[in-house]
Structure formats: structure tokens, C-alpha cells
Amino acid sequence: MLDTYQAEGLRAKSKQTKKTYIFCLSKFVEWLDGAGTNLEEYSRTDIQQYIDYLVSKGYSATTINKNWSAIKHFSRWVKKEDAIEDISVITPPNILNQAPKALSRNEVNKVIREIDRSGSERNFAIAQILINTGIRLNELVNLNRTDIDISERKGNLTVRFAKGNKERQLPLSSEVRRAITKYLETRDDSIEALFLSNRNIRLSERTVQHIFEKYEINVHSFRHTFITKLVRNGEDFSLVQSLSGHANADMVIRYSAPNEEDKEEAVSKLWLSD
């Protein structure tokens, strides 16, 4: 049934939404099997108990609501609207009121230092680009050599496979230019991809994630750090929006929201001066 739903029910959805919904529903199927039922015979009580189960397991509100969205969409597709009536679901926090988690200066310096010591020119160039341009992971792996323009005194990177198909150019600092140049000097092939795997094919998103998991770093945190730094430095929001590739200005504004460290620091200073 899930195969038919994916082909027909999710036809108009994005690739990522399809992937998310099918994953969530496959987990729901596993739970239903343990509860003695299936996707053809589940009831409203099954859905409510499954949502309650996710809550009891400590899943975040965002994760729980992704599962609920998938189940709700599927239930409407199979015309089981009665099974989704009056379901109690935890309300997720408004992401626009939350500052994304950014890395500290020490965390950034540590990962740069450790990757440099590893001796991998490729991984070092990847780290420098992610930290100093804030590009998305899928934008990174889709870069070609022709997207890099470097001279002795300046350089830029062109993001062509951007979200919303909006191409943008980003300046490259001297450290990034040096790292890319050093990496390209190790290449003796004519493959167009900027970053290659050990099998000489375009590097995958999963491989990049694996590189930084060894340092306990989430790749997306580099983007959060880049944008947060720009906002905290007082750069104009239109400039930050242009550099980050965010189509919605509200997504940039949220980086100015106080994070937990800001709150803790404010409270700790409360009685330090009159």
C-alpha cells in the first residue's frame, strides 16, 4: 500500500517530503503490527495511542508533528478522515522565535584544527567552505570546478543548485582560497565535480555528514554559525539574506533571537554590577 501511496498520493509533494512521509509511515506500520493491526484496519484510537507513544519516548514536538502530518495525509488519501478527528498532538514551538544552534568560536577552531591535522586537503577545503560561506550541504556536493573562480587577491564561489533555483555568488576569504587551491593541486583528473569520493565520483551528502560526525559536528550547524555571526556583527538583513540564500526574511530574523547561552549569560551578570 505504501508503494501505491508514494506513487499516487505523494505525486505532488517534494522529494524530501516524500522521503519524510514514507519513513514516518513505515515506523507507524511497525507500531501497528505490534498492536495487532495494519494500515488497512487501524482506528482513531491507534493513531492517538501512537502519538502518545512518541511523546512518552521523548521525541521532540517537531518530530512528533512530522509523524502526525504524514499519518493525517495518508488517512485522508485512504478516506479514513474519521480516524484523524480530534487527535491530541503536542504543539511545536514557533521556530521564528528560536535562534538556531550555532557553534562557538572554540568549537569552530577545534574542528578546523583537527581536520587540518588529519592531512586531508579535501576535508579541510570542505570545512573552510562550509564555515566561511554558510552554503547548504546539497549546494556543497553539487559544486563543480567551474563554480570556483580564484585569483591571487580574490575569489568567489557560484551556487547554481540553490534552494528555489536562485543562483548566487559568494566571496571567498584568503583562507578558503588557499584551502581550495591546495586541494585542487592534489587532483590529476578532469572530472567536473569539485569534491570527489575515494572512488572518484561526486561526493555524497552522507559522506560529508560522516566526515563531521567523527568530530561530533552536525554539518548544518556551520550554516547556522555563519548566519548567526553575520547577524550578531550587525550586518544589514538584506545582505545576510543575499549571502545565505534565504528567500524569506523572517528566516534570517530568527537568527537575532536570544539563544540559551545568551539567556544564561544575562542572568549570570545580573548581580555583577549596580
Image (cartoon, rainbow, N blue to C red):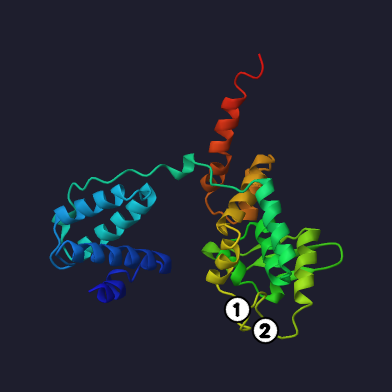
The residue under the point 81% across, 60% down is 174
Residue 258 seen: no
Query: Where in the figure is residue 157, as x and y percent of width and height?
Result: 70, 65
> Does residue 98 lie above or below 51 as drawn?
above
Image position of 176 (left or right of 240): right
Question: Which residue position is annotated with label 2?
Answer: 191
SS at mark 2?
loop
Q: Earlier in the sequence, mark 2 or mark 1?
A: 2
Residue at label 1?
Answer: 202
Instruction: Look at the image and tell me whether residue 264 can be seen.
Output: yes
Residue 93 rendering spot, x and y as whole percentages? 40, 42
- Kind of residue at badge 1: Arg
Q: Are marks 2 and 1 in contact (CB under 8 Å)?
A: yes
Location of residue 46 with respect to 88 vertically, above or below: below
Residue pushed farthest right?
A: 152
Residue in view at x 62 percent, y 48 percent: 103
Q: Is residue 44 left or right of residue 51?
A: left
Label 1: state its secondary structure: loop
Q: CA distance from mark 2 to mark 1?
A: 9 Å
At 17% across and 61% down in the image, what residue appears? 35
